[in-house]
Amino acid sequence: MEVRVGSRVLCRWKDGEFYPAEVIQERFMPSHQFYVHYIEFNKRLDDWVDLRDIKSLPPNSDQPSSMVTRFHKRRREELHPSETIEDVCNPTLAHLEKEHEEYTKIRNIEKVILGRYEIQPWYYSPYLPKYPHLKKLYVCEFCLKYMRHGRTYIEHNKKCKRSKPPGKLIYRDKVTISKIKTVSVYEIQGNEDKLYCQNFCLLAKLFLDHKTLYYFVSPFKFYVLTEDNGRHSRIVGYFSKEIGNDEYNLACILILPPYQQKGYGRFLIALSYELSKREGKIGTPERPLSDMGRVSYKSYWTDAILELLMQKSNLTVKEITEETGISQHDVIETLTSLNLVKYWKGQYIVNSVNSKQIEEHFKKKKERKKKLKGQFVTFNPKKLSY
């Protein structure tokens, strides 16, 4: 069969099944391959595939999504719930977004070496623009300096004087994640440690599809989360927050892949809301959220609201917002998904809560955490020095 850039095909995925895909680019080294985007899947799953793993779409297949299994449709809907799209009538913004999307379609780095981890990036990041494709990029896990060659990386590690992030230590606590570790958070001013924050943004872009700011870091604070072993603090993730922006309490959030599924995402979300509470503000994250960010926030909002409703009954939406620090929009969205709110005579009324249903919800969460065998970190507000 003849395969061209821009054509729609069926492409074999890791599970051995064929799914609708769009051909983005072609190359002939190391073999004849095509870079494809699986139409029903997140962009981070885009990859190079061999010609033998591609076949033609059946005739009259104008709707590729009809060939995706119900499981994958349901999974996609879970990860990509409908979100409000703002500025759809802004042609300038639409043009810039389209231009950015075209330029960053292809993942430009195959592997990132970060300390003891070798990580496959998910998205394009503008490291070393003179080199459109890198098999490996080496990043110092302490100062975040990046290098093309392993030899340079080894020499740098011998000389690097940084053992922890810059900035102010605002949180430290001992947790159990397979073994007892110390978890720390550093608050970093973007205008004071500009290079470090810029390098963190470049690293984050490898795993955040919607991130577009890499160098404009001065208006932001960065909250960097680490695991400490006594001598060194290894970065786990971070979130950024725009200084002086009262509308949003979080701009970008990332947990690096080796540290995911351990509760660190929820940890940073809880920290962002605690910071807002101490500033006397109501919080909400900037949109759009990534697919995993959306799932994490929905889980956090659900638990925070249900925990409050277990303790106090007959609360209004406004009272829930004041107690939790979660914006009214997010409270209403969460209550709606739980069928716990109705709109009557121009206002939202919180329905009476079935305590057994709430108990069952937390029982299931407790069972899931138990399966992790203690490898789930939690945020302790008492350890925050702010």
Image: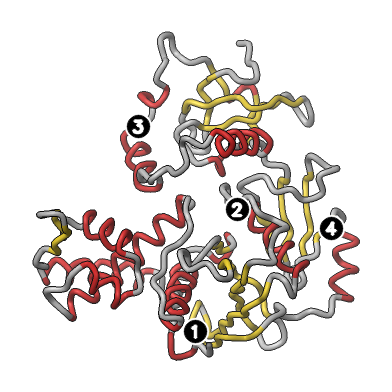
Residue in the picture at 73% in, 46% down: 109
Local packing at callout 4 (Cα closer than 10 Å; few below 14, some 14-19, many 20+) is some
Q: Secondary structure at mark 3?
A: loop
Local packing at callout 1 (Cα closer than 10 Å; few below 14, some 14-19, many 20+) is some
Residue in the picture at 61% in, 73% down: 224
Mark nearer the viewer, 3 or 4: 4
Local packing at callout 2 (Cα closer than 10 Å; few below 14, some 14-19, many 20+) is many
| Pointer 1 or 2: first along the chain | 1
Residue in the picture at 24% in, 70% down: 318
Q: Locate residue 288, reporting x and y percent.
A: 48, 50
Question: How far separated are the C-alphas under marks 1 and 4?
Answer: 33 Å
Q: Quadrant of residue 305?
A: bottom left
| Pointer 3 or 4: first along the chain | 3
Q: Quadrant of the N terminus?
A: top right
Is 1 in front, or is 334? Answer: 334
Mark 1, residue position: 175
Mark nearer the viewer, 1 or 4: 4
Q: Tell me, yes or no, whether the two marked residues, 3 and 1, touch with CB atoms within 8 Å.
A: no
Q: Pick out the residue farthest to the top.
A: 59
